[in-house]
Image: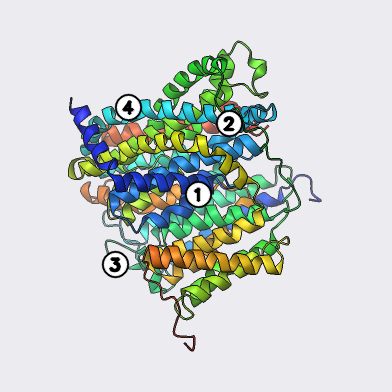
């Protein structure tokens, strides 16, 4: 925060809004706008993208008139392990099946904390998998394949 | 005596053994997740939502009511014991509740919360039962233009109540509306913003958005700094029952809080959050010892908690009669109803009276469960607070993954969870409030549909929104509210209320 009169967080916020607005606006170009009597699929999103763009510009401009506040820490390790967990589950739940997929998903998520040791992580993943398989698959009868076609069973 | 027979119908539905059991399970689960530090009521409900989808509509909503009450109570517990409110509505409770806990009166503070909430819940259940049918009749007169204007008012109110910058909260509403539009256009069948992914043709999954933006973003925030240790007031949770003096001190605040909360809860977009702030400010103003506030005043716990609960209860009125959610939690309820195939709105009362009255009765039963269940079990919940966070969040991640997948067995919903988790975290780092986004997302399709229908009905004449009296009134109210908060003087006052709550 070298410049006292610019709030970098607000600059980033404004830029993010503008980028999102431009993205939606650009996607709207392919849609038929129609008239105000018979609005096409693009009419409402077009108004919204325009609004978002204006709001983004206001946020960006007012950022240069206020003092910056510290941005704070970023949970890099959290981002690295938390976000892939549901993605991995999505990629493998059909192929590997519910049981192995959930086991690995929990293991991945457990890595997000520096305080988690390998053995407790393993025990936790086993416990979560056993519990969930019992509750969701057997008791609630959700239609999950417990072991999928990718496994040589 | 129509009121009594209606309530009777409600209790006969909600009072069946199976539904009572679902309500109980919901209350336990809600408290279980709700007491986890840093996870507020909205995140709790978002995470538990998928579990209820396997049930039939009435049972599912009854279980949800239990979850809701449990989550609220769990939030108050963390606010009091570790000064960590998961939600802005319990931020007020934390001010004096935590101070009571530090004086060794945590047990009394928790009991006051439960009893105050229960009283407020009982009164407002009757209010809902009295006013909902009348409002439903009014709502049947609503055309597309009125609906559009009412939703605009609701969205504006949610902006006003958000923390921080108004412009940024407005931007979140607009972004929410845009995300709500993703999917197939209902009039022409044209896919919009789906990137050619057919799995998103039905729109983005509401649960995926809620779990990502609220749940996962909160987990990430908690993982930012793992070195801090929290001070848990476990030793002091004895002597649960408040003393006679406590009871005397809480009667007034509870009554006033119930009144304020019931009134504010009816406003779309307002509801519980505003209610607890208003009650706290009022109690402080009329108290004989205002210096006690912030140092463990009983009125500072009893008033806001009652107001919060009464407001939460009466916010069911706009939800059930008009289909307009008053706050993020109600938005989650609407999402749950839509997934169950129920379109919230005036027709619910006439077409499905057992559902309508069943939900109202179950709200009260959920509240009762809380008093019966949680006062004795509080020791258990306190133990849960001592479980280290790094054990809890992998479990939460696994449950979220299963939950989101179980909604529609769509693996793309899981990718959306990760995306919205990232977006939610980024938004919180850039000081955006997620609540207006969720409200916008839920209302987006409804807003567009009513806008288009109103324009077709008026033959393309946009003045339809200002020539119809109800619609004009609603729009003028939205404009008035927006102008008011943008005025510098009032803006300052609003900031002070929030600063006070964080102090």
Q: Have a look at marks 2 and 4 and say if they share a chain.
A: yes
Task: Give the residue number, with chain letter if any, for mark 3.
Answer: B189
User: Toward which corner of the image does residue B148 lie, by quadrant?
Assistant: top left
> Marks 2/4: CA distance?
25 Å
The dot on residue A136 is none
Please state if B434 lies on the left or on the right of A38 as rendered.
Answer: right
Residue at numbered disc 2 = B92
In the image, residue B433 sits, relative to residue B477, either above or below, namely below
Q: CA distance from mark 3 to mark 2?
A: 47 Å
Closer mark to the observer between disc 3 and disc 4: 4
> What SS does tag 1 mark?
helix
Q: CA distance from mark 1 to mark 3?
A: 35 Å
Q: Nearer the viewer, residue B492 or B410?
A: B410
Q: Are marks 1 and 2 in contact (CB under 8 Å)?
A: no
Query: Does label 1 or label 3 sit earlier along the sequence?
Result: 1
User: Are both tags, 1 and 3, on one chain?
Assistant: yes
Q: Measure the alpha-carbon separation of dots 1 and 4.
A: 27 Å
Q: How is the image coloured?
A: rainbow
- Sequence-first tag of 3 and 2: 2
- Residue at image position (28%, 48%) is B58
B265 or B56, nearer to the observer: B56
Mark-to-mark CA distance, 1 and 2:
19 Å
Q: Chain of mark 2?
A: B
Crowding at dot 2, Cα within 10 Å, few <14 / some 14-19 / many 20+, comes out as: many
């Amino acid at each position: 925060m070298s410049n006292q009169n610019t709030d970098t967080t607000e600059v980033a916020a404004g830029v993010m809004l503008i980028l999102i607005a431009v993205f939606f606006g650009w996607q709207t170009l392919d849609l038929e706008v129609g008239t105000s009597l018979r609005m096409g699929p693009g009419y409402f999103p077009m108004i919204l993208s325009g609004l978002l763009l204006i709001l983004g510009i206001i946020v960006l401009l007012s950022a240069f008139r206020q003092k910056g506040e510290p941005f704070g820490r970023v949970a890099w390790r959290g981002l690295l392990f938390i976000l892939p967990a549901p993605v991995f589950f999505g990629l493998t739940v059909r192929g590997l099946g519910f049981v192995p997929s959930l086991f690995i998903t929990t293991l991945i998520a457990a890595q997000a904390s520096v305080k988690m040791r390998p053995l407790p992580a393993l025990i936790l993943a086993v416990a979560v998998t056993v519990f969930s398989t019992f509750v969701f698959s057997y008791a609630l009868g959700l239609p999950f394949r417990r072991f999928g076609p990718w496994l040589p069973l | 005596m129509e009121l009594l027979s209606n309530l009777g119908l409600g209790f006969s539905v909600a009072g069946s053994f199976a539904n009572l059991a679902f309500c109980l399970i919901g209350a336990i689960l809600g408290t279980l997740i709700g007491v986890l530090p840093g996870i507020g009521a909205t995140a709790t409900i978002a995470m538990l939502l998928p579990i209820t989808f396997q049930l039939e509509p009435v049972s599912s909503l009854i279980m949800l009511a239990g979850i809701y009450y449990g989550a609220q109570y769990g939030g108050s517990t963390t606010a009091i014991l570790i000064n960590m409110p998961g939600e802005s509505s319990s931020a007020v409770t934390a001010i004096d509740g935590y101070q009571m806990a530090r004086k060794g009166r945590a047990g009394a503070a928790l009991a006051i919360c439960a009893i105050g909430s229960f009283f407020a819940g009982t009164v407002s259940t009757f209010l809902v039962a009295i006013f909902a049918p009348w409002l439903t009749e009014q709502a049947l007169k609503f055309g597309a233009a009125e609906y559009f204007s009412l939703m605009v008012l609701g969205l504006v109110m949610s902006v006003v109540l958000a923390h921080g910058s108004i412009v940024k909260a407005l931007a979140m509403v607009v972004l929410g509306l845009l995300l709500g539009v993703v999917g197939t256009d209902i009039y022409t069948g044209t896919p919009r913003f789906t990137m050619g992914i057919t799995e998103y043709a039905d729109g983005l999954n509401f649960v995926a958005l809620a779990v990502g933006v609220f749940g996962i973003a909160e987990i990430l925030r908690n993982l930012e700094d793992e070195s801090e240790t929290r001070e848990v007031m476990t030793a002091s949770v004895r002597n649960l029952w408040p003393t006679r003096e406590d009871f005397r001190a809480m009667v007034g605040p509870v009554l006033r809080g119930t009144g304020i909360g019931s009134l504010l809860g009816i406003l779309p977009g307002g509801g519980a959050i505003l209610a607890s702030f208003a009650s706290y400010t009022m109690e402080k103003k009329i108290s004989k010892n205002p210096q006690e506030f912030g140092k463990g005043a009983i009125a500072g716990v009893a008033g806001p908690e009652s107001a919060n609960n009464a407001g939460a209860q009466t916010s069911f009125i706009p939800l059930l009669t008009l289909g307009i959610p008053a706050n993020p939690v109600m938005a989650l309820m609407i999402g749950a109803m839509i997934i169950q195939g129920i379109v919230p709105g005036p027709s619910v009362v006439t077409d499905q009276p057992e559902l309508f009255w069943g939900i109202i009765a179950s709200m009260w039963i959920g509240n009762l469960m809380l008093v019966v269940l949680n006062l004795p079990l509080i020791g258990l919940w306190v133990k849960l607070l001592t479980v280290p966070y790094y054990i809890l969040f992998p479990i939460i991640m696994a449950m979220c993954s299963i939950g989101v997948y179980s909604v529609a067995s769509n693996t793309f919903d899981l990718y959306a969870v990760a995306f919205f988790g990232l977006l939610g975290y980024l938004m919180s780092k850039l000081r955006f409030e997620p609540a207006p986004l969720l409200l916008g997302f839920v209302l987006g399709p409804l807003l567009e549909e009513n806008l288009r229908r109103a324009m077709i009905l008026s033959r393309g004449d946009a003045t339809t929104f200002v020539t119809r009296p109800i619609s004009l009134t609603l729009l003028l109210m939205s404009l008035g509210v927006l102008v008011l908060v943008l005025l510098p003087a009032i803006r300052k006052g609003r900031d002070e209320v929030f600063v006070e709550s964080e102090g």
